[in-house]
């Protein structure tokens, strides 16, 4: 839970009291009864006892409020109960920061008395930047960060470092790196060196680490960065910047936050959901504080383009228009677009060949490097052992003309044996026999995909440098349609990724474990999902179980859990090419589930029913009823039979019978781990879980250019029943109905 969240309830009550008259002049104060009265330093008292080092920082803590909607200062927070990590800048660090603002032309004098600071907005922004970036709320159950945590984070990505799990007060996750050849510091936090002598300072409400520079990650948007690359011809991404500008995408890439949502949340118009019926002892569905926009961009660098186009030594002498024309010609000549794409200079048109090429590089969601694919409970992996032996993948929908983009990480690359490599649109042959392990067997050269080389974070995006051209044409569409496409539902809902909700790794922050999403009539938070009245929409994560004994049986460890007399409508991802597809959904039967009717089609306001209602209480071996109990020994209507050891013929026959009833066993690619697990037991495979199934929803002709919707409506009157949504599968007929090569169990 972040600092602002701790005061939400106070703020919301205040907002209700003042109603429409609410202004920034609110004067609510922190309840001082929460302050410590026993011996020992709080973070604030420690800092105050060392004015030679921290007087400037303390002065800011006394001024800066916890939000624009609160009169409570950050110093009041740091004198009260809590559990915080404080990266305290020295007086010299703050002086140095002010000098950097002079050098960047922001102010004329390195002083808080600079004439430019008569602009109250600039002054407030500058103060907030120093304070908000220096503090992380570690929650009630998670220890504040120490240097041992820095060491662990710095070791990731071949020593390039990784982000801390929790965001700071400014909602930025800070990169930890190892400092080389510096006797005063071993680690840097977002480029600011941490003192070796004044670190790990224990206080009764957290830890203090002295830093030699103000932590100030760039607030530059990815759109601003690319615009600057054009204007100043900055090496690195000059070519791609020119392409973005030609396609009129830079304004969209400059968006940061839906400020109206934040205002409505702060004044109490968007309220938390009631406690969930079964999760966390009735944990409330906490609404997100923000609705950030985000982007993930995969970019061929200037060096690659210069070599490909034969422009070594002359690239930066070319005008942007010249570059655009050369790349456009290259795209058309090599058919790096779908058939029927238009040519010419109408680059903003999504059917234009160059527009198709450029927009395929962009996912409209901010995805962290460690979440391009999600590791949680794929076979052999657990949060405790982090063993990677099974191929992991995800599918995302790109900007512009809607197409699928695949991310994939094999446990090791066939041929060279490299590990921890994430590829785009790699289509290998996997070891997918019933007794194999789903690792990479071989990959044809033409299907090897594009390797992600490095990443850079912007305030609203991640930019990933890639090894080769990224495109979507008829060939890629065919390769993608030739495999089963399993889509975690959270990858459809971009806001869950951009707002650090999906796969958040905190085990103590309830605001990210049981997340509520407002009904559409209240606020349209999810662009690709409409939530009806009488519908309580919860996002639940199994990461809460990391400190327990077992994982959740959900794919990737999370789920959408819908409660009430619900109605939700989701815009489906596109299929890669025209054809007959089978659409399936993952189900998890238990006594809390209800029954729903599924609707599917192209007109979201008039969707026809897809089959008969689904009883989601019906598991593989037991019949669950709506009253919260099940009849032991009662026969299943599904026809699920457990696998017989070492008899694949019998198991295949049982799978066929199960399909005839409209069900499939859960994929064999993930399992039910425990912290004590040292080896995978047969009955830990999710395929062996009778409550975890796949339900075949429909088989229909689908077109790649068509947008389809799926809708789920409760058919029971019990308002406490739950609807579970985890993942979807699109499977083309040549896979699910292949007489020569049956679909694999993975």
Image (cartoon, rainbow, N blue to C red):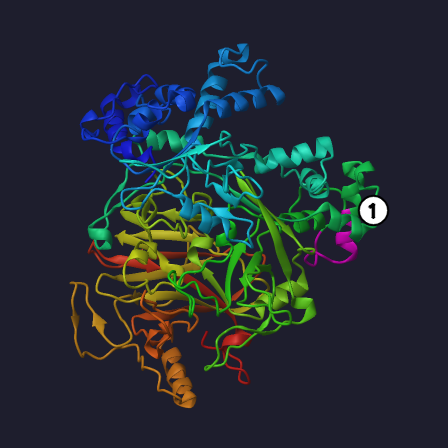
Q: Secondary structure at mark 1?
A: loop
Closer to us: 430 or 664 = 430
**Residue at x-position 32% and y-position 30%:** 43
- Which residues are the magenta region? 327-341
Left or right: 617 with respect to 658? left
Circle 1 Cα neighbour tier, 10 Å, few/some/many (<14 / 14–19 / ≥20): some
Q: Quadrant of residue 587?
A: bottom left
Question: Is 726 a magenta residue?
Answer: no
Image coordinates of residue 443 in percent, x first then y, are 63, 71
Q: Quadrant of residue 321?
A: top right
Question: As displayed, is residue 42 above or below residue 52?
Answer: below
**Residue at x-position 65% and y-position 58%:** 472
Image coordinates of residue 659 in percent, x first then y, are 39, 78
Question: As displayed, is residue 505 above or below residue 461?
Answer: below
| Residue at image mark 1 | 311
Residue 394 visible in this rendered orientation of the protein: yes
Please state the total of marks drawn on the protein image. 1
Image coordinates of residue 638 in percent, x first then y, are 30, 77
Question: Is 333 a magenta residue?
Answer: yes
Left or right: 625 with respect to 169? left
Left or right: 541 with respect to 184? left
Residue 267 visible in this rendered orientation of the protein: no
**Residue at x-position 64% and y-position 62%:** 449
Closer to us: 351 or 628 = 628
Q: Image quadrant for the N terminus?
A: top left
């Amino acid at each position: 839970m972040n600092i602002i969240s701790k005061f939400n309830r106070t703020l919301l009550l205040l907002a209700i009291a003042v109603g429409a008259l609410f202004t920034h002049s609110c004067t609510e104060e922190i309840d001082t009864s929460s302050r410590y009265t026993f011996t020992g330093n709080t973070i604030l008292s420690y800092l105050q006892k060392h004015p030679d080092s921290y007087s400037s920082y303390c002065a800011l803590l006394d001024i800066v409020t916890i939000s624009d909607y609160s009169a409570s200062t950050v110093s009041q927070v740091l004198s009260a109960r809590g559990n915080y990590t404080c990266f305290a800048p020295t007086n010299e660090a703050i002086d140095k920061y002010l000098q950097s603002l002079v050098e960047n032309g922001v102010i004329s004098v390195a002083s808080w008395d600079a004439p430019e600071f008569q602009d109250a907005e600039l002054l407030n922004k500058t103060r907030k930047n120093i304070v908000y970036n220096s503090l992380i709320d570690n929650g009630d159950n998670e220890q504040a960060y120490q240097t041992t945590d820095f060491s662990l984070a710095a070791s990731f990505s071949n020593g390039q470092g990784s982000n801390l799990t929790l965001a700071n007060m400014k909602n930025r996750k800070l990169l930890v790196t190892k400092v080389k050849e510096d006797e005063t510091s071993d680690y840097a936090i977002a480029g600011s060196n941490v003192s070796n002598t004044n670190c790990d300072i224990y206080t009764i409400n957290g830890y203090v680490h002295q830093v030699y520079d103000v932590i100030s990650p760039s607030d530059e948007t990815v759109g601003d960065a690319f615009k600057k690359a054009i204007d100043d011809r900055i090496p690195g991404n000059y070519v791609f910047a020119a392409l973005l500008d030609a396609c009129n995408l830079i304004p969209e890439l400059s968006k940061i936050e839906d400020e109206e949502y934040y205002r409505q949340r702060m004044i109490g118009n968007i309220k938390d959901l009631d406690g969930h019926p079964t999760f966390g002892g009735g944990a409330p569905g906490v609404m997100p504080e923000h609705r950030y926009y985000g982007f993930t961009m995969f970019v061929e660098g200037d060096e690659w383009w210069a070599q490909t186009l034969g422009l070594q030594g002359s690239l930066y002498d070319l005008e942007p228009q010249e570059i655009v024309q050369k790349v456009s010609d290259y795209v058309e000549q090599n058919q790096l677009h779908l058939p029927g794409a238009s040519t010419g200079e109408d680059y903003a048109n999504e059917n234009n060949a160059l527009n198709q090429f450029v927009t395929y590089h962009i996912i409209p969601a901010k995805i962290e490097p460690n979440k391009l694919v999600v590791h949680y409970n794929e076979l052999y992996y657990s949060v405790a052992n982090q063993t990677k032996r099974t191929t992991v993948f995800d599918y995302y929908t790109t900007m512009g003309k809607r197409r699928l983009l695949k991310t994939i990480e094999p446990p090791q690359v066939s041929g060279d044996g490299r590990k921890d490599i994430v590829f785009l649109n790699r289509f290998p042959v996997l070891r997918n026999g019933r007794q194999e392990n789903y690792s990479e067997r071989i990959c044809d050269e033409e299907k090897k995909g594009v390797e992600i080389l490095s990443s850079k974070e912007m305030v609203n995006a991640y930019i990933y440098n890639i090894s080769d051209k990224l495109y979507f044409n008829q060939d890629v569409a065919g390769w993608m349609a030739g495999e089963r496409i399993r889509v975690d539902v959270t990858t459809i809902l971009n806001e869950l990724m951009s707002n650090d909700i999906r796969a958040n790794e905190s085990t103590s922050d309830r605001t990210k474990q049981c997340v509520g999403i407002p009904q559409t009539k209240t606020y349209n938070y999810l662009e690709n999902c409409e939530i009806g009245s009488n519908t309580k929409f919860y996002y639940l994560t199994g990461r809460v179980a990391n400190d327990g004994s077992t994982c959740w049986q959900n794919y990737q460890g999370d789920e959408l859990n819908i409660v009430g007399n619900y109605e939700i409508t989701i815009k489906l991802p596109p299929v890669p090419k025209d054809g007959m597809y089978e659409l399936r959904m993952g189900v998890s039967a238990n006594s809390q589930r209800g029954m729903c009717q599924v609707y599917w089609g192209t007109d979201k306001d008039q969707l026809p029913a897809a089959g008969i209602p689904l009883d989601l209480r019906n598991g593989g071996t037991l019949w669950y009823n709506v009253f919260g109990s099940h009849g032991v020994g009662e026969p299943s209507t599904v026809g699920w039979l457990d696998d017989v050891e070492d008899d694949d013929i019998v198991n295949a026959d049982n799978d066929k019978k199960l399909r005839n009833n409209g069900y499939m066993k859960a994929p064999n690619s993930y399992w039910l781990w425990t912290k004590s697990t040292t080896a995978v037991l047969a009955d830990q495979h999710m395929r062996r879980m009778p409550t975890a199934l796949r339900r075949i929803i429909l088989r229909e002709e689908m077109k790649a250019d068509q947008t389809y919707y799926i809708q789920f409506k409760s058919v029971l009157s019990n308002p406490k029943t739950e609807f579970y949504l985890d993942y979807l599968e699109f499977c083309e007929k040549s896979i699910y109905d292949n007489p020569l090569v049956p679909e694999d169990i993975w």
